[in-house]
Image: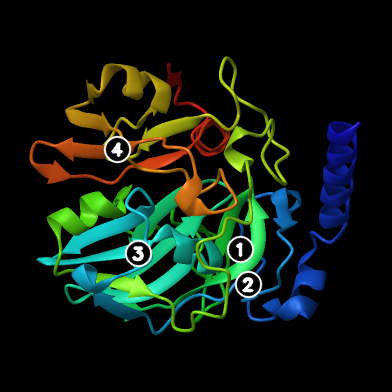
Amino acid sequence: MKHFVLSALLSFTVLISQAYANPDIWKIEGWGNTDFSKSSIDFKEVLSGGPPKDGIPSIDRPEFRTAAGIEGLEEHEPVLSLTVNGQTKAYPVRILTWHEIVNDVIGGVPVAITYCPLCNASVVFERTIDGDVTEFGVSGKLRHSDMIMYDRKTDSWWQQFTGEAIVGSRLGTKLKILPSRTESWSRFVERHPEADVLVPNNIHLRQYGSNPYVRYDTSNRPFLFRGEFPEGIAPLAYVVSVKDGDKPFVVSLQKLRDEKTLTREGITLTWTDGTRSALDARQISEGRQIGNVIAKRGDEDIPYDLTFAFVTHAFMPDVPIEQ
């Protein structure tokens, strides 16, 4: 009965969202500057995630402390780490969960640190477009359960998983993706004890450390998703997606976990234990361990994503999931 009620509620929510999938209504909601005549998507694919434009506030003036001086992070908690031009920073997922975008500068490069909890997609983009430094915010809209970002200069909509503008005057523009890692706090602080780590601007603004999507990554179906599911694998099974180069590929986390190391298209994936899921227990610090992934071409880190099977099937339908 419980699953029936949840399914019915989800279907009702989708129907309501579809009824409002209309540019005329979106303009009333605050999207009057968005050029909806330029679009690469079916507007019916766009659903409301609940919060309005900027209802999930991006962090635009990030504050940091030195890693060695950080307290309160459990050793296996996930952080997103990034090195640019010799400068390294970490962004705890316990903060990203509640803000989804951090507009920052690292190594002199303006970047957007992004995390979509519903897809467990952590992607870092350069945010300079045609020589113009651009700030990104959270639209409150979803497509294939993935966050739609927007840029604050043109109000164009961008797909977070791909980094491509899908609606607006910047239609078709693609952001450059930078290599990053999602790793345990202990691994990061051991490697970079003097690096900067993101801290909340206001510790009381959100319930940092808690997970609003309890048991999400072991549920039967993703939230607000209407597309087809991949065959032979659970929709919310973790997969490693590599979009770098001419031949993208996707490998199930279970396969990588079993083999520890895999090499595909000149790229080596490595799995080690010790990193918790951010989408399991009520407290992220108590989540089950799913492990740590590194992707390298030779000695160089390359962009990858530890996401869900339904996500890669939605955005990379021609790329099979190796299991």
Distance of mark 1 from mark 2, alpha carbons? 6 Å
Q: Which residue is mark 4?
A: 293
Q: Return the disc, 3 or 2, that comes first in the chain's sequence.
A: 2
Q: Residue at x 42, y 43 (%)?
A: 276
Residue type for callout 4: Val
Residue 267 percent across, percent down from the top left: 20, 31
How far is the residue under mark 3 from the one under mark 2?
Answer: 33 Å
Q: Dot 4: few (<14), some (14–19), or many (≥20) neighbours within 10 Å?
A: many
Which residue occupies 52% across, 69% down?
99
The reply to whether callout 1 and callout 2 are in contact (CB within 8 Å) is yes
Res. 77 in view? yes
Give yes or no for contact between labels 3 and 2 (Cβ–Cβ under 8 Å). Answer: no
Mark 1 element type: loop
Residue 157 visible, this angle: no
Q: Position of residue 293 (x, y in %)?
A: 29, 37
Mark 1 near mark 4, Cβ–Cβ under 8 Å? no
Q: Secondary structure at mark 4?
A: strand
Mark 3 sits on what residue?
Answer: 91
Q: Earlier in the sequence, mark 1 or mark 4?
A: 1
Disc sitting over residue 35 in the figure: 2
Cα separation between marks 1 and 3: 34 Å
Q: Which residue is mark 1?
A: 38
302 relative to 283 in the view: left or right:
left
Q: Nearer the viewer, mark 2 or mark 4?
A: 4
**x, y percentage for residue 222?**
66, 39
